[in-house]
């Protein structure tokens, strides 16, 4: 699940951006040439109803792969996988159904303990949460039926074990067979303390993926994350739309343990559960922030069951390349995910999640950039690879598979550019860099942005953990410096009211059936970024530069190992 934004109250945005916009409203938009006459056609095609939301393994997904592959072939790209443009990605598709409510009971009966009065209420007071609106659950275990029967609920703070921060939320607690309830994000966000974790910026410990992984390592039978829009970085609708329906994981035995049940609790559901236990959400959050926090049982037990079907399947990354004229064994990567959420069909209606911004804009971008490189004479000095990856929306699966099974060695990959959800609201003066200041690849981006009279700025909401949320992160984990950037909110020739409107419009459409081309789209902003990414990759492809991670980043040591392999 890839998740992003939440609506910020208008007055807060206005106050925060007033200093930016007071001098920007009267700027004139510098003439921006059209990058490619094919770009709009590609976006319109990929986001059309005919492509049915581009879910992996569906007819719409198959059409998408065929379309991208045919265009790569027409452009004259070389197939990247032993004569084929397709890199098969083994998938397991898991579909849950017949979800029971989550029921909360006392251990010794089918009733609930009232911890405020030491009495036990009757069955009419049983607490339960319904699937979709009050909770979302699933499982990555390949079982026909998932049955969790009166598993003890324990509160494990943020669910983090981080020796480098001297932090262990599981210390002294045996959770084998139990269900842990944890908070989203990490303590640094809540306290806004730069000396705690990474301060306001989310660390990997704050990601939902980590919390499930750690709970499994601790032996938990289940894990429920309390959802809050602020620290999560997205609303409940994103959880519902991303977690319901078929879910995918990389096929084969990856050796990673998984809880029997993984899920989310709506904030109001969590508050009701805690009230039964005689607790308040804000109160346990404050307890979880203390260095001496001790996990504890909630004195309640949870039951849930559902059925699921699972099938082994396959999707594909689509990859082609332009061979380097001087250094063909060294590569530069452009990457975007081609998939989206597909469609849902009920007796009443068909809903198509067209994914125009996310990520028809990015897929079309690498296609038109690829054509520019294919027409270069002479060819770029380094080989330039173009990868349209699958199953990003299901957990960055296509990029994960490529990073573990690369078609070109990662130790000889100079760097890459990930394009995901481009700005459609018009040209901007600022370029937001996700993971600002982490590698010197950013220096090349800065130089190219300056040629457009633009400046680089850090992401506005580092607490949302965008750096861990898109396909580039699987390459980052292998030590490859990656650029993940997009336009900011300093719209040239526009005022702050427009910026607020644009942000709210994107929030409203994100991961919904309304992510379609509409009247607010300003294609000049897209052209602006296409030129920026093209020239940034071109500069790296025609240089002897080997971007490196900055001192103190957790990926620097991996890159240094790659340097040694390459030099030897």
Image: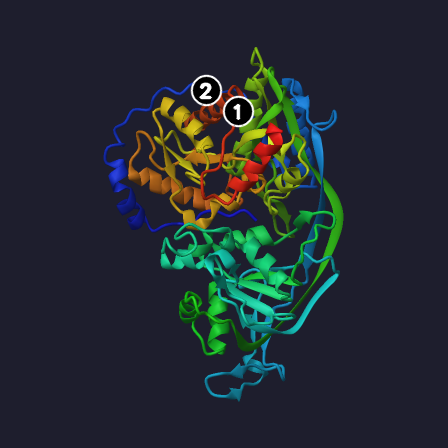
Disc with the residue nearer the chain's start (1 vs 2): 2
Mark linked to residue 408 = none
Q: Are marks 1 and 2 in contact (CB under 8 Å)?
A: yes
Where does label 2 land, which residue?
34
Classify mark 2: helix, strand or loop: loop
State the quadrant of the C terminus. Answer: top right
- Of 530 and 157, nearer the camera is 157
Tell me which residue sits at (68%, 27%) in the image.
Answer: 80
Separation (CA) of disc 1 from disc 2: 9 Å
- Of 236 and 44, nearer the camera is 236
> Looking at the image, can residue 90 be seen?
yes
Quadrant in the rendering for residue 292:
bottom left
Tell me which residue sits at (36%, 25%) in the image.
Answer: 450
Q: Residue furthest top?
A: 377
Q: Position of residue 426 (x, y in %)?
A: 39, 30
- Of 457 and 1, nearer the camera is 457
**Callout 1 environment at 10 Å: few (<14), some (14 to 19), or many (20+)?**
many
Where does label 1 land, which residue?
39
Q: Position of residue 193 (x, y in %)?
A: 36, 56
Q: Position of residue 265 (x, y in %)?
A: 53, 63
Tell me which residue sits at (37%, 53%) in the image.
Answer: 194
Q: Where 423 falls versus 99 (above or below)?
A: above
């Amino acid at each position: 699940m890839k998740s992003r934004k939440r609506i910020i109250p208008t007055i807060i945005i206005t106050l925060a951006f007033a200093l930016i916009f007071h001098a920007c409203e009267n700027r004139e938009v510098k003439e921006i040439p059209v990058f490619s006459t094919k770009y709009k056609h590609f976006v319109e095609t990929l986001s059309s109803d005919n492509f049915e939301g581009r879910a992996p393994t569906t007819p719409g997904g198959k059409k998408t792969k065929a379309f991208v592959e045919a265009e790569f072939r027409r452009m004259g790209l070389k197939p990247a996988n032993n004569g084929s443009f397709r890199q098969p990605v083994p998938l397991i598709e898991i579909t849950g159904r017949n979800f029971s409510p989550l029921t909360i009971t006392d251990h010794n009966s089918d009733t609930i303990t009232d911890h405020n009065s030491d009495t036990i209420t009757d069955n009419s007071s049983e607490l339960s949460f319904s699937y979709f609106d009050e909770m979302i659950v699933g499982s990555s275990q390949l079982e026909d039926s998932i049955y969790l029967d009166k598993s003890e609920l324990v509160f494990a703070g943020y669910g983090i074990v981080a020796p480098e921060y001297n932090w262990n939320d599981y210390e002294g607690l045996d959770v084998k067979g139990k269900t842990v309830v944890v908070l989203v994000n990490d303590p640094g966000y809540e306290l806004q303390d730069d000396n705690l974790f990474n301060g306001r910026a989310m660390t990997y410990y704050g990601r939902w993926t980590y919390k499930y992984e750690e709970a499994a390592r601790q032996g938990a039978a289940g894990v429920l994350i309390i959802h809050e829009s602020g620290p999560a970085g997205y609303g409940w609708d994103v959880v519902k739309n991303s977690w319901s329906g078929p879910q995918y994981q990389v096929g084969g035995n990856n050796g990673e343990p998984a809880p029997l049940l993984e899920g989310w609790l709506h904030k109001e559901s969590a508050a009701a559960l805690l009230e039964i236990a005689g607790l308040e959400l804000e109160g346990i959050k404050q307890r979880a922030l203390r260095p001496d926090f001790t996990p504890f049982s909630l004195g309640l037990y949870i039951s849930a069951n559902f059925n699921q079907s699972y099938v082994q399947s396959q999707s594909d990354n689509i990859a082609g390349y332009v061979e380097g004229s001087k250094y063909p064994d060294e590569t530069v990567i452009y990457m975007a995910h081609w998939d989206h959420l597909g469609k849902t069909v009920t007796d009443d209606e068909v809903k198509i999640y067209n994914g125009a911004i996310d990520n028809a804009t990015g897929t079309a971008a690498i296609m038109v950039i690829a054509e520019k490189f294919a027409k270069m004479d002479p060819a770029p000095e380094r080989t330039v690879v173009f990868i349209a990856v699958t199953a990003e929306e299901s957990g960055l699966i296509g990029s994960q598979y490529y990073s573990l099974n690369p078609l070109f060695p990662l130790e000889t990959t100079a760097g890459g550019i990930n394009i995901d959800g481009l700005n459609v609201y018009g040209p901007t003066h600022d370029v937001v860099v996700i993971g600002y200041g982490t590698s010197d690849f950013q220096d090349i981006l800065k130089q190219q942005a300056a040629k457009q009279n633009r400046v680089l700025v850090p992401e506005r909401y580092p607490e949302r953990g965008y750096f861990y949320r898109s396909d580039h992160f699987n390459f980052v984990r292998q030590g490859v410096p990656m650029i993940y950037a997009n336009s900011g909110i300093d719209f040239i020739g526009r005022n702050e009211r427009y910026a607020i409107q644009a942000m709210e419009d994107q929030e409203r459409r994100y991961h919904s059936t309304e992510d379609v081309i509409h009247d607010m789209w300003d294609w000049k902003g897209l052209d602006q970024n296409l030129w920026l990414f093209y020239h940034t990759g071109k500069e790296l492809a025609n240089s002897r530069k080997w971007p490196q991670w900055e001192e103190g980043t957790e990926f620097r040591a991996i890159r240094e190992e790659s340097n040694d392999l390459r030099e030897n």
